[in-house]
Image (cartoon, rainbow, N blue to C red):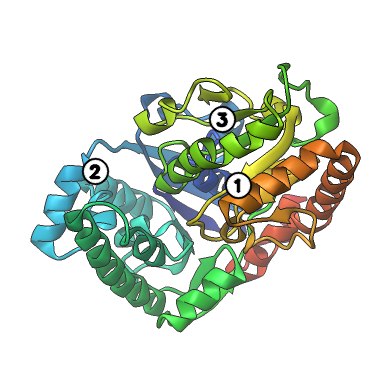
Amino acid sequence: MDRARSGVMDILFLAHRVPFPPDRGDKIRSYHILRHLVARARVHLVAFTEDDRDTELPADLAAMLASATIVRRRKARALAAVEALATGRPVSLAAFASGAMRRAVRRVLAANPITRVYCFSGQMAQYLDTRTAPMAVMDFVDVDSAKFAGYAGQGSPPMRWLMRRETRVLGRFERSMSARVDASLFVSEAEAALFRQGGGRGAVHVVENGIDAAHFDPSDVEPIDGPGPTIVFTGQMDYPPNVEAAVWFAEAIMPIIRRSQPQARFAIVGRQPTAAVRGLAGEGVIVTGAVDDVRPWLAAAAVCVAPLRLARGIQNKVLEAMAMARPVVASAAAAEGIDHLGTIRVADTTEDHAAAVLALIADRDDASALGRLARMQVMARYAWPARLQPLDTLLGLDVRAAA
């Protein structure tokens, strides 16, 4: 198909991280949304990267994009905090404030007949000029200000003060943006309701996360081999809620499990583990760091766990484990946004997590049946094309262009 033919609209896609490779929650969502859009429109990608390895686009994606501009982000968190305090802005925005990014956005808008802007994540909202810009959709994903409210009870007194400030200042910015854009998107109805209750204005819509069930297919994956039942937790391991969950499970829950299952091991699978996570490695605990493919670890899991005390929206780690037909034990917070129909076990206390995991390890037939039901639910409910279909109407996309 000739992508330059008349009638195909031009969309500017702004992202706070390059949407490739799809190896963490935010990049998984942005990657699949971007692929959905490039099948229906001419898409101009402008995104930040924090990793020099991500400045080169995958060949297949580069061939589908009308243009791509990647801006290197190097600003230190401490500098962003100082700038935010000096200007009265949220730290989250100061961290992503960049003259190079502003110039890149202006160049793309000046050189192309952009009629839609898809802004992915609140950090990029500062690059929207809604007074002169074309139709703008703001994909907040989660209510980030509420996330900082959850952090506000942790850490030193100065950090708690900073988190309370971020909750207040960022919340005000989120509400202001919602009144200025054509639509605000959230990953679950719970997040959308929270935003509305907090004063969010304008058109608020839900576009849920999905899963590539063909990719996460247990029949096509060779499991990692190892002794004893393996309990697997996946995610970006410098993300504070993941760090807290990994530490809690390793230090509080695993000792209970290993009293009944001495050979059980806890595998923490994910990139950039912090010192606190790396320090957990030892008897009964594996810390892998970055892996090329998470599926062999999921396939090897007797149980997958998501013991997050603070979680927002839909947890990709849970959907991936379900798609791999693994039995899952998740906290109520991690399970809240997922329509799982009882195909995962929900636990919150240390004792309840340990008991749920031990029960699934002990009854392999029940665990296998639960995993099969979980995969069936994912395939029926969370295929990406169905989850992203609302974007076609919202953006006025030409669905025929995707044929």
Type of residue at label 2?
Ala
Q: Secondary structure at mark 3?
A: strand
Few, some or many residues within 10 Å of mark 3 (<14, 14–19, 20+): many
Residue 169 point in image, percent of width and height: 25, 69
The correct choice, above or below, for 172 with respect to 104 in the image is: below
Structural distance between the alpha carbons of marks 3 and 2: 35 Å
Residue 306 tag number: 1
Residue 225 point in image, percent of width and height: 73, 16
Q: Which numbered disc, 1 or 2, marks the residue closer to the eye?
A: 1
Q: Earlier in the sequence, mark 3 or mark 2?
A: 2
- Residue under numbered circle 3: 269
Q: Earlier in the sequence, mark 3 or mark 1?
A: 3
- Residue under numbered circle 2: 100
- Most extreme residue toward the left, as rendered? 86
| Residue 271 visible to an observer of this rendering | yes
Name the image quarter holding residue 190.
bottom right
